[in-house]
Image (spheres, helix red, strand yellow):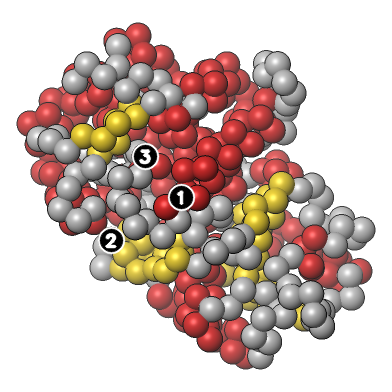
């Protein structure tokens, strides 16, 4: 299996052919495309998108989806499947274009994996979390029976086109949401990336990842983006189908799936991951895997990024339930990745509910003083 992740600029520029050539077979290329686009993205960019497609001589149909986490269900998948069938997709020459955030690319990916058992599609993530996480792996999925991404498949897009210019229109909260996944990669494998976030994190939010910062080797936003994507791809590559369940990229994803689903619609995905990371950081420090200074530094970065450490749904009973579900997901083991110093991680298999309760008590007073909701 191979697929491409491509950083690019100005996808809707009429002279740029990347959007209409990505993922198509070279033999007898087609000028037809079904485009599934997030409703908010469509409202912001519809004139530019239609102008681009018309200028490139494309025959196309738009399928506009409302993509919120509660709407990430099989109903949305069936709507995309109906659009595919009505459009009369050619088997290989007409890849579906998925333009939107991680929820949309997950929905379209699952539909594409089902239609004729494998239809090519191209991901164009328009959110930071889509660019550094959801849009670059092989997994697709929708929520089911109050479980996060319980139904899904492994079906990566043929190409993922990452244009950071989309982030200029992204609300600040959704920038912070994506930076939670960037911070995850920094904490478990990249101390240099952590230093960049510590120095420029708040500026990256304020200037929508369009600014220059203190990075010595160029624009801070570009450096942060490249390091996060490169780190994720290197972790995914040797274990793309998750044959092994000891994945350090599951950091922040032990308790967060349950927290996110129970807190809907109050917590975004990255915010739930941030709460999980805060809890995991305290667990690591209590086990002697982090120093007090390292814990303080990590929590300071979380705070500067505007990410929450706690939410009212966080209760010992819910954490115990989340841990039990994770153990089932990881074949009877906890396999919880914890930071061992900033930029390194190792797995633990013996976290107790008593430990979780103590760690939660350590977090809650500080978080509660600033308010019980998400940042």
What residue is rendered at 20% in x and 56% in y? 331
SS state under label 3:
helix
* Residue position for label 3: 248
- Give how far apart the Cα atoms at labels 3 and 2 are: 21 Å
- Relative to 363, is 72 on the left or the right? right
Tell me if residue 353 can be seen: yes
Q: Quadrant of residue 64?
A: bottom right
Tell me if residue 107 can be seen: no
Label 2 vs label 1, nearer the camera: 1
Q: Do callouts 3 and 2 mark residues in contact (Cβ within 8 Å)?
A: no
How far across and down, in percent of the image, does residue 183 sit?
A: 47, 31
Q: Quadrant of residue 28?
A: bottom right
Quarter of the image with the N terminus in it: bottom right
- 59 or 247: nearer the eye? 247
How far across and down, in percent of the image, does residue 136 sit?
A: 56, 53
The circle on residue 147 is 2
What residue is rendered at 13% in x and 44% in y? 320
Judge the density around disc 1: few (<14), some (14-19), many (≥20) Cα neighbours within 10 Å.
few
How far across and down, in percent of the image, does residue 168 sit?
A: 70, 41
What residue is rendered at 92% in x and 58% in y? 15
- Give how far apart the Cα atoms at labels 2 and 1 are: 27 Å
- Relative to 315, is 5 on the left or the right? right
Against 43, is 297 above or below?
above
Please report whichever mark, 3 or 2, sits nearer to the chain's N-terminal start. Answer: 2
* Residue position for label 1: 238
Quarter of the image with the C terminus in it: top left
Q: Do callouts 1 and 3 mark residues in contact (Cβ within 8 Å)?
A: no
- Give how far apart the Cα atoms at labels 1 and 3 are: 13 Å
Please report whichever mark, 1 or 3, sits nearer to the chain's N-terminal start. Answer: 1
How far across and down, in percent of the image, does residue 233 sit?
A: 54, 46
In the image, farthest residue toward the left:
354
């Amino acid at each position: 299996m191979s697929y491409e992740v491509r950083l690019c600029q100005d996808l809707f520029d009429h002279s740029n052919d990347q959007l209409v050539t990505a993922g198509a077979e070279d033999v007898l290329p087609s000028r037809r495309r079904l485009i599934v686009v997030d409703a908010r993205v469509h409202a912001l960019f519809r004139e530019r998108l239609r102008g681009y497609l018309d200028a490139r001589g494309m025959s196309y149909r738009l399928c506009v989806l409302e993509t919120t986490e509660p709407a990430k269900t099989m109903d949305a998948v069936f709507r995309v499947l109906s659009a595919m069938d009505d459009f009369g997709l050619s088997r290989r020459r007409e890849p579906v274009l998925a333009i939107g955030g991680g929820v949309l690319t997950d929905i379209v990916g699952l539909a594409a994996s089902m239609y004729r058992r494998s239809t090519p599609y191209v991901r164009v993530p328009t959110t930071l979390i889509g660019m550094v996480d959801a849009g670059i792996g092989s997994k697709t999925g929708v929520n089911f029976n109050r479980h996060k991404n319980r139904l899904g498949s492994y079906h990566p897009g043929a190409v993922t086109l990452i244009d950071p210019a989309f982030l200029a229109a992204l609300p600040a909260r959704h920038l912070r949401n994506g930076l939670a996944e960037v911070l995850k990669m920094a904490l478990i494998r990249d101390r240099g990336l952590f230093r960049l976030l510590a120095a420029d994190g708040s500026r990256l939010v304020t200037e929508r990842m369009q600014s220059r910062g203190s990075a010595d080797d160029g624009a801070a936003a570009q450096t942060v983006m490249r390091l996060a994507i490169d780190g994720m791809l290197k972790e995914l590559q040797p274990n793309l189908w998750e044959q092994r369940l000891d994945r350090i990229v599951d950091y922040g994803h032990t308790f967060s799936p349950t927290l996110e689903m129970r807190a809907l619609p109050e917590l975004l995905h990255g915010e739930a991951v941030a709460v999980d990371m805060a809890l995991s950081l305290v667990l690591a420090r209590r086990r002697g895997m982090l120093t007090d200074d390292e814990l303080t530094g990590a929590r300071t970065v979380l705070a500067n990024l505007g990410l929450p450490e706690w939410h009212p749904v966080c209760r010992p009973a819910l954490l115990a339930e989340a841990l039990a579900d994770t153990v089932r997901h990881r074949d009877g083991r906890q396999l919880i990745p914890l930071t061992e110093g900033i930029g390194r991680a190792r797995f633990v298999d013996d976290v107790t509910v008593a430990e979780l309760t103590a760690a939660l008590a350590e977090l809650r007073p500080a978080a509660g003083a600033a308010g019980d909701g998400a940042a």
